[in-house]
Image: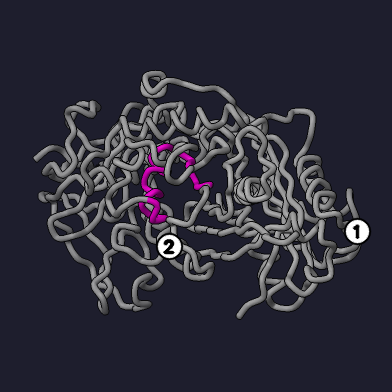
Amino acid sequence: MAQDIWVLGTHMTAFGRYPDQDAVDLATTAALGALDDGAVGMADMDILSCGTLFQANAGMGQQVQKQIGQTGIPVYNVSNACATGATALRTVIMAIRAGEAEMGLAIGVEQMGKMGLLAGGARKEKNVYEPSGRFGAVMGIDGILGTDTMPGVFAQAGMEYANDHDGVGFEQFAKVAQKNHAHSTLNPLAQYQKEFTLEEVMGSPMQSYPNTLLMCCPTGDGAAACVLVGEERFASLSVEQQSRAVKISASVLTTDPYVESGQMQPDVNTLTRNAATAAYEQAGVGPEDLSLVELHDCFATAELIHYDNLGLCEPGGAGDFIDRGAPWRDGDTPVNVSGGLISKGHPIGATGVANVYEVATHLRGEAGDRQIEGANVGLAHVIGLGSSCGVHILEKSGIG
Amino acid sequence: MQIPLVDYLVLGDEPHLQANECADCGARYFGRRNACAHCGGREFRTVRVSDTGTLRTFSIVYRAAPTIPTPYVSAIVLTDDGTSVRSNLINIEPDPSKISLGMKVKLDTYVVGTDDDGQEAVAFGYAPA
């Protein structure tokens, strides 16, 4: 049996726009916040893992060390699309489980500014057509042979679910965004904190049917960090530290296994289902035990299909699940009470750590106005196209 | 002179798609392969893909990189011989009320551009059958 791992300290910056700070500033704020929160320092850390996507070759972990403590410990700079933050966490967890570290720091950070639409390349027509690349293409194929744009790819994932199941359409997808915008009004760390009616969500500019602008996550800046500790070292900590710690009862990272259609359309379902199944087994809990879920709602269409992929609803029942209000904060299984990626924001490298921050903060009973009362078990999910899926299940300490 | 947009589109009297099919497990791929992602097999044969199929999923894309004309209908088609193909729906209004999941579609080709030598690039799409 692998040893238990605990989140000892955690912190996140508010997500948003930081034109006067760089990514090192943001990562440092999160890191120092997490260390202070856990009442430990860099001298206690045996390993540092730092996740960022767009500055993946910047040696971000070492840059953070040079601001807060060059103790000579190993740094792992990681990058794994939108699962980058979860991968930073997993790296520290694996090091502790392998017996090479007792305590470590995982950071996720991203500074995107107003990057706009991700993926989907401009078409550069060559003067003379010559086949190139793996498809022997004579020009960029985005927009001719389907779409590479993220709103479009996830729209298709949602519409595929609508194809296979009754009671799912534009309105059900829009209700997801309506909920997350409403939830975000209680979260001071959210990039946007504004409520919209269902009509406003459905009437906002169409990006990729059925995803309107208000159904898409924004780009932005932010960072989050967690101090993680193994059970042996945990036992030597003070009761104050132990009582606020949150147990990681499952930590899983998967990639997409072969499916026929996956060659053409990224399969975001199978790897999420596999990760969820493994996580529930590791933790010894089921979806019905979850007090709250933070899942990867990069687009409203994505959240809806993950209700099913994570087993939160009956198989095929994601449309009914949102129609009856089950994922609202006062529903059966509150989903994305932080506002989710759609409204809290999605600075990519930070997201997978920020989700764990959010769940841990509820389990500690420290989530302020957005607190889910009596929360004792929560799940954090991220998915990066390509693909990777991270699932963490956290449990309240029960000590002290 | 015409040249296909991608090398898995075969032009001629009967334009069609061809796939690389794993000789061991039958998994189909478009584009150059190193080995089979399903079974690890390293032998492939070239097979013709059915021209007809059904609409598996779609999105009407309004926002794209600046040089790409919008709106367009992006689609995944499941051909009658069970191969998934990514392309655009063509000869159809980009209106959700005009597009139904599961609808029958058929491969069609069109000229998508001309280079400085007068060479035409031919693309494919799927039109309502």
Residue A70 is tagged as 1
- Which residue is outermost to the front? A400
How are the colours assigned in the image? one colour
* Mark 1 nearby-residue class (10 Å; few <14, some 14–19, many ≥20): few
Q: For this rendering, which residue is in front, A110 or B125?
A: A110
Q: Chain of mark 1?
A: A
* Mark 2 nearby-residue class (10 Å; few <14, some 14–19, many ≥20): some
Question: What is the span of residues highlighted in magenta in the rendered image?
Answer: A294-312
- Ranked by sequence position, the earlier of labels 1 and 2 is 1
Q: Position of residue A250 (x, y in %)?
A: 57, 65
Question: What residue appears at the point 73 percent right and 30 percent down from the top-left corner?
Answer: A18
Q: What amino acid type is highlighted by mark number 1?
A: Gln
From the viewer's perspective, is A209 left or right of A187?
Answer: left
Q: Position of residue A381 (x, y in %)?
A: 52, 53
Taking the image as drawn, is residue A124 in sight? no
Q: Are marks 1 and 2 in contact (CB under 8 Å)?
A: no
| Distance Cα–Cα, label 1 vs label 2 | 37 Å
Question: What residue appears at the point 26 percent right and 79 percent down from the top-left corner?
Answer: B24
Identify the image quadrant of the C terminus of chain A: bottom right
Q: Chain of mark 2?
A: A
From the viewer's perspective, is B87 left or right of A46?
Answer: left
Q: Quadrant of residue A215?
A: top left
Residue A256 is tagged as 2
Taking the image as drawn, is residue B94 in sight? yes
Residue A297 forms part of the magenta stretch: yes
Q: Position of residue A190 (x, y in %)?
A: 62, 32
